[in-house]
Amino acid sequence: SPRRRDAVAESAEVEAERGNPSGCEQARQLCVHPRGSMLRDESAVHEAKDRRRRSRGHREHDRPVRVLIADDSELFREVLGKLVGAEPGLEVVGLCRDGAEAAAAVRRLRPDVIILDLMLPRRNGFQVCAAMRERGDWSPILVLTANREESVGFRALSLGALDILEKPGARTDLEQFGRLLRSRLKLLAGVRVIRHPRGLRGLCVHLAVADK
């Protein structure tokens, strides 16, 4: 049957990958001798599928985390870009100067993590968060803000941000801040965002570290 032929082909593929021509030939003989061992045939099929699944997982794991940065300060965007780019596993894919540009870049570039300033021109960070979540985009967002008020942080989280960091000041150790920033980005890249069934009322995200 076509289904059996597909299974045999997968079995032959596994044997070929092992460098076992005799096993490959035996798999092909199952087409001629239908009473051959179907247990062995099915086991080979499952093994081939597992090999492909693991291969895809390794490729995804090796790919750098793609980061989009949105801040209205050109100097701070450059600083953030250098801090993020200092980590081999992180890649800056875009620098945005306002909220409208950030919203468009998110749709176009589909980053793994977004660094978002709240006080952006044209469209502030709160509006960017809300617009993304309302259209079903649950990309992880790390908010950077100089505002220490709890109400500001709570509002950002309630709109879908996953984490908040205080912006570095004049006396901040940039090397230490960079390490903290990079660790947060890598952590957020491995997070699955689950929408709350009540939508955007209250805290609308739950964090679950993805299986490695």
Image (cartoon, rainbow, N blue to C red):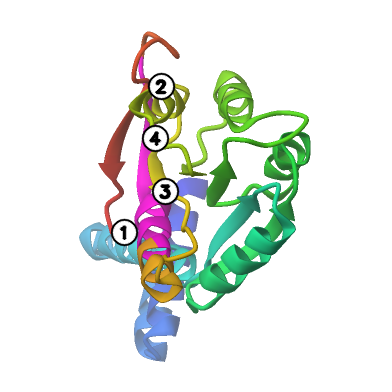
Mark 2 element type:
helix
In front: 204, or 163? 163
Mark 1 → mark 4, Cα distance in angstroms: 30 Å
Q: Tag 2 or tag 4, which sits nearer the N-term?
A: 2
Q: Position of residue 28 (x, y in %)?
A: 44, 72
Look at the image and tell me whether residue 29 can be seen.
no
Mark in front: 2 vs 3: 3
Mark in front: 4 vs 2: 2
Label 3 sits on residue: 166
Mark 1 → mark 2, Cα distance in angstroms: 44 Å
Looking at the image, which residue is at 72% across and 28% down? 123
Q: Tag 2 or tag 1, which sits nearer the N-term?
A: 1
The amino acid type found where label 3 is placed reads Glu
Mark 4 → mark 2, Cα distance in angstroms: 13 Å
Label 2 sits on residue: 158
The amino acid type found where label 2 is placed reads Ser
Mark in front: 3 vs 4: 3
The amino acid type found where label 4 is placed reads Val
For disc 1, the neighbor class at 10 Å (few under 14, some 14 to 19, many from 20) is some
Q: Which mark is residue 46?
A: 1
Q: Position of residue 167 (x, y in %)?
A: 47, 52
Q: Tag 4 or tag 3, which sits nearer the N-term?
A: 3
Above or below, comparing residue 128 to residue 73 in the picture: above
